[in-house]
């Protein structure tokens, strides 16, 4: 590597298309074989980096930036959420932070609705029954679930993914209510026939509560024991945003005690660990953070991250910058 060739550190495996883009402009370092690097080891390989491409599993903070040194210009987070990044600390050092909004909207909404169908129609429970070779026979009362037609979806955070979830609910004959820090534009409300409600009213009204808000200090444990108690005993909770938005211990207790009817979870409070109280319950559908896990979506996310790196290294504005 010459003194003018940028050094780009990529913390985990990303699709080949994105790596090829990065190699057009710099020397790319990747862990081989792919593995999660302890912070100390990641900091060591960051030394002298001009750019870094990271995933939500890495903590990007002042220590991360200082390990890279004064040449670090951009950190591209391959995710929409950026709760793993201390954006103000990086901004103080003149480092640009980017994320990957838009490209994973449909894939994540698909998973959210898939989890909803799985828990309401007891699909996972039914598959476990068959795989365990438990004897069964069809009858009219066998494994009855809950239909969605005529029910109300409550969306917490009507951003891009929340809107996509609401559109899917409409197709299933559900009505839509939503809450958030601010009301959506009138044309968005009209297109989804969505009604704004304060959070407490939404929790008491919705048959399904689907979480699509970012993880912030205000939304950590947004759904706690009190919020769960405010929901209908026949209601379901779906979380595909970030695990700590839900108090997982409180949720396990609520599911066990019948405070709510069920839940579908793709994210977890202490990921990759799952609260043990959830694992033995049939009224919860679980997935290992598959929200954006399609070939097309993960490729689009990684290539957007790479294009952000290329733009910043070329002295151009990033495509999707995160500001403090």
Image (spheres, helix red, strand yellow):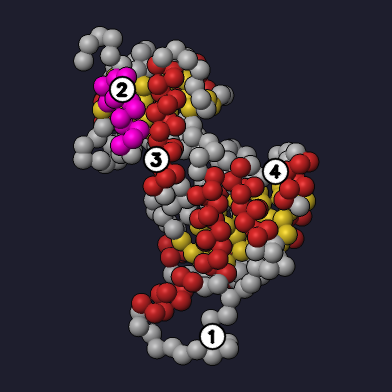
Q: Position of residue 289 (x, y in %)?
A: 44, 51
- Secondary structure of the residue carrying tag 2 is loop
Frontmost of labels 3 and 1 is 3
Magenta segment's dominant SS is helix
Q: In screen coordinates, is 69 left or right of 274?
A: left
Q: Residue beneath label 2, please?
A: 24
Which residue corresponds to mark 4?
180
Residue 230 seen in the current view: no
Residue 299: mark in rendering: 3
Instruction: Report the Cα–Cα distance between label 3 and label 1.
Output: 42 Å
Indicate the quadrant containing the N terminus: top left, top right, bottom left or bottom right: top left
Estimate the spatial distance between the alpha carbons at disc 1 and disc 2, rounded to whole Å. 59 Å
- Which residue occupies 44% across, 32% down? 304
Asked if the residue under mark 1 is in contact with the one under mark 3, i.e. CB atoms within 8 Å, the reply is no
Is any part of residue 190 visible from this angle? yes
Q: Earlier in the sequence, mark 4 or mark 2?
A: 2
Q: Which mark is residue 142?
A: 1
Rendering coords of residue 314 (x, y %): 41, 14
Residues shaded magenta: 16-28
Tell me if residue 217 is in the magenta stretch.
no
Question: If you read the primary sequence from the N terminus, does the residue marked by circle 1 or circle 2 appear first?
Answer: 2
What is the spatial separation of the Cα atoms under label 4 and label 2, in whole angstroms? 42 Å
């Amino acid at each position: 590597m010459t003194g003018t060739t940028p050094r780009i550190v990529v913390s985990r495996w990303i699709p080949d298309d994105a790596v090829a883009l990065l190699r057009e402009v710099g020397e790319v370092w990747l862990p081989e074989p792919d593995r999660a690097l302890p912070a100390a080891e990641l900091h060591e390989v960051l030394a002298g980096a001009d750019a870094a491409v990271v995933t939500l599993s890495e903590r990007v903070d002042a220590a991360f930036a200082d390990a890279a040194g004064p040449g670090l210009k951009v950190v591209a987070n391959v995710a929409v959420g950026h709760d793993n990044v201390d954006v103000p600390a990086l901004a103080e050092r003149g480092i640009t932070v980017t994320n990957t909004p838009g490209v994973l909207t449909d894939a994540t909404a698909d998973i959210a609705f898939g989890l909803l169908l799985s828990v309401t129609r007891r699909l996972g429970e039914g598959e476990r029954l068959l795989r365990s070779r438990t004897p069964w026979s069809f009858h009219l009362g066998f494994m009855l679930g809950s239909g969605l037609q005529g029910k109300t979806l409550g969306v917490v955070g009507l951003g891009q993914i929340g809107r996509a979830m609401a559109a899917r609910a409409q197709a299933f004959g559900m009505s839509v209510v939503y809450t958030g820090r601010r009301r959506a534009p009138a044309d968005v409300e009209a297109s989804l026939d969505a009604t704004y409600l304060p959070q407490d009213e939404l929790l008491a009204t919705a048959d399904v509560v689907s979480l699509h808000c970012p993880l912030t200090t205000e939304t950590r444990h947004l759904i706690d024991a009190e919020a769960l108690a405010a929901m209908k005993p026949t209601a379901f909770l779906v979380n595909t945003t970030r695990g700590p938005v839900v108090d997982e211990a409180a949720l396990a207790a609520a599911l066990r005690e019948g405070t709510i009817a069920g839940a579908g979870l793709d994210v977890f409070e202490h990921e990759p660990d799952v609260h043990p109280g959830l694992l033995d319950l049939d009224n919860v559908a679980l997935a290992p953070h598959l929200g954006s896990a399609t070939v097309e979506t993960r490729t689009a996310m990684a290539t957007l991250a790479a294009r952000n790196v290329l733009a910043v290294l070329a002295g151009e504005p990033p495509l999707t910058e995160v500001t403090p």
